[in-house]
Amino acid sequence: MHRAGGAFRVRALWSGVASIDHSRVRQSWDRIGLWLRTHVRQAPLRPAADAGRLDAVEAAQAVTLPADVKEWWALADVSADFWIPGDFAPVALEEALDTREIWLLVAEEEGPLFDQNGEPEPRFLPEFIPIAMSPGGDGLIVDLRPGGANGAVFLWDHERWGLGVPLWDSIDSMLQDIAAALESQTPVLRRALTPNPGHGLCGLCQRSGCVAEGVLEGDR
């Protein structure tokens, strides 16, 4: 569901992360996966994407996927259940691309990107790509635009639109945060639990309470 803008693709970059067994993404998922296998029911697995498919997406969509995003989609044993706080389940690459295209079409039908005062309207952009979805149709998306938020994970409310503040700086930090929260039974998104004067409490915190024990509650 998105086009995207700005290509950089060096096959050597992918080859540098192709062996992901010792990466932090792999390590964090292994910790999460162990906790889930110990405490909740077994769930279907999200399909993995191989390096060739990820390369093809970068070329076709004119996007640059950060290394940890590639590693995330290359993991072959990720649970497809709703284990991400806020009741989100990881989606396969193909589902992410389909959702992206739908949201881009909706944004296009909304008309101009700027209001009559020249202010940007909240729109789903080609440089956004979802990584997880909730049953209600909201998403966790990664911002692929150049700049300080590149690779950051945001909540995308399909009714309100707009990004708000980043939930995590990257998929890598998201997985580390969730792994630590599950193991210690402490809140995730600690920085988001302190309201920002400009934005208030993050939307995901308001929805989920940001507590580790809320993950897959009732599935133990």
Image: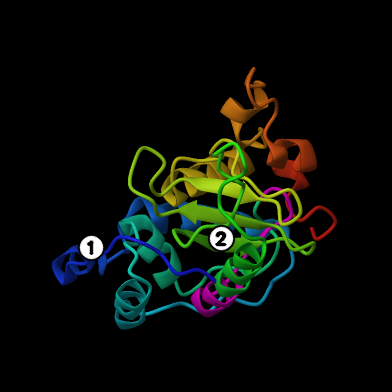
Residue tagged 2: 33
Q: Is residue 90 magenta?
A: yes
Towards the viewer: 141 or 123: 123
Residue 59 visible in the picture = yes
Residue density around tag 1, few if under 14, some if 14–19, many if 20 or more, within 10 Å? few
* Magenta-highlighted residues: 85-99
Dot 1 amino acid type: Phe
Residue at the top extreme of this rendering: 197
Find residue 7 and report its horizontal and vertical position in percent.
27, 64
Find residue 119 and report its horizontal and vertical position in percent.
56, 38
Task: Identify the residue at horizontal 62%, vertical 29% (top origin).
Answer: 192
Question: Quick one: SS at disc 2?
Answer: helix
Question: Quick one: SS at disc 1?
Answer: loop
Residue 210 visible in the picture = no
Find residue 35 and report its horizontal and vertical position in percent.
61, 54
Q: Looking at the image, tell me whether mark 1 or mark 2 is earlier in sequence order.
A: 1
